[in-house]
Amino acid sequence: MIGFLAFFIFLYSMSLFIWDIEIYGNSRYSSDTLMDFLESQNIRYGMMAGTVSCESLESAMRSEFSEITWVSAQVSGTRLLVKIKENEVLSSIPVRDTSPCDIVAEKGGTITKMIVRQGTPAVRPGDTVEAGQILVSGIVTVTDDSQTVVAEHPVHADADIRARTISEEEKTFHSWRKVEAYTGKKKTGLFLKAFHSSFSLIPPSDLIPGKQKKENLPWKFTMEEQQARLFDNFYLPFYWGKITGKEYETYERPYTADEKERLKVEVNSQFLEKLGEKGVQIIGNNVRIQESGGGFSVICTADTEEAIGTSRPLTIQEPADDGQEPVSNESEETDN
């Protein structure tokens, strides 16, 4: 009877504390970042549940993180549940840059399309350009009836310019690769944790590599951890888990032909994925392996179409001041 009563007293005492903290709905802010903030607010594992001010926590999180628009904090059983919603639209409108500038080519290519909203086109569709070449000038000229320049106005050149380009990437590898092979030997053990104390039940020679003899092979350990709970929201400060160790050895050997082929496919896939993330249109693709003395290279090439224009500040020596407004012109040209 005394043991039964002691058990319920123990459960009641455990219910007075927070033994699990969960955060839901975050994508822009990582869970680690939010947990660090909770720690700075003295919200932590093992604290008295009655000392948690959910309203204060909600207000503090909205003040600290500008992209969080809604917070709901709730103590349920021995858990603190924090649900948030993040802003899905821009919280502020970017300030538009109106300083005078040219548009130059980020890389070489053949112009396929130009939509000029402001500035003077320096090239046209079909032209081949080099990196750094001016595509749209930030100087707009005003001429009289005889086509004589009577004024020049600096403007912020604005245009959408696309060009046919070549994108390349090369990755080099050593001819020999390190391989880890399991020997087939396994060790299993038990992990236990109560409050902030933990220990493992497994042969010390397997757990502490530094105490192994030099001729012993290394081990890799994995653990599956579980937290004790009575109900969905009644967690306890007790953990257990199974530890599994596998002995392995390392050695070096040359890449096989199949491994090189798989590596070629993997590198090329990553190359094309990065181009796609930049909004580059892929027209053609080629990948090859080039052998060298001590290794080999995977060379990826793609025939692409992409935006190549970038702003470059315009240096104004003698700004025109004849009382006329800057000229804005819009045109569209496409290479057929």
Image (tube, grey):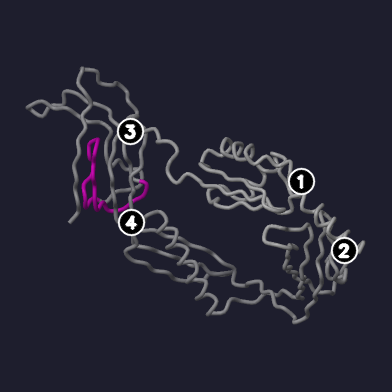
Amino acid at pointer 3: Cys
The answer to which image quadrant residue 221 occupies is bottom right
Name the one closer to the observer, 223 or 300: 223
Amino acid at pointer 2: Phe
Q: Do the residues labelled 2 and 3 touch (CB within 8 Å)?
A: no
The residue pinned by badge 2 equals: 4
Q: Which comes sooner in the sequence, label 1 or label 2?
A: 2
The residue pinned by badge 4 equals: 165
Disc number for residue 280 = none
Amino acid at pointer 1: Met
Q: In the rendered view of the protein, which quadrant contains the C terminus?
A: bottom left
The residue at the point 33 percent across, 59 percent down is 281
Q: Which comes sooner in the sequence, label 4 or label 1?
A: 1
The residue pinned by badge 3 equals: 101
- Badge 4, how many Cα within 10 Å: few under 14, some, many 20+? many
Q: Which comes sooner in the sequence, label 2 or label 3?
A: 2
Secondary-structure class at tag 3: strand
| Residue 178, above or below 195 | below
Image coords of residue 304 (percent x, y): 33, 59
Q: In the rendered view of the protein, which quadrant contains the N terminus?
A: bottom right
**Magenta segment:** 106-127
The residue at the point 20 percent across, 39 percent down is 330
Disc 4 versus disc 1: nearer the observer: 1
* Residue 69 on the magenta span: no
Name the one closer to the observer, 278 or 107: 278
The answer to which image quadrant residue 273 occupies is bottom left
Name the one closer to the observer, 27 or 81: 81
- Badge 2, how many Cα within 10 Å: few under 14, some, many 20+? few
Q: Do the residues labelled 4 and 2 touch (CB within 8 Å)?
A: no
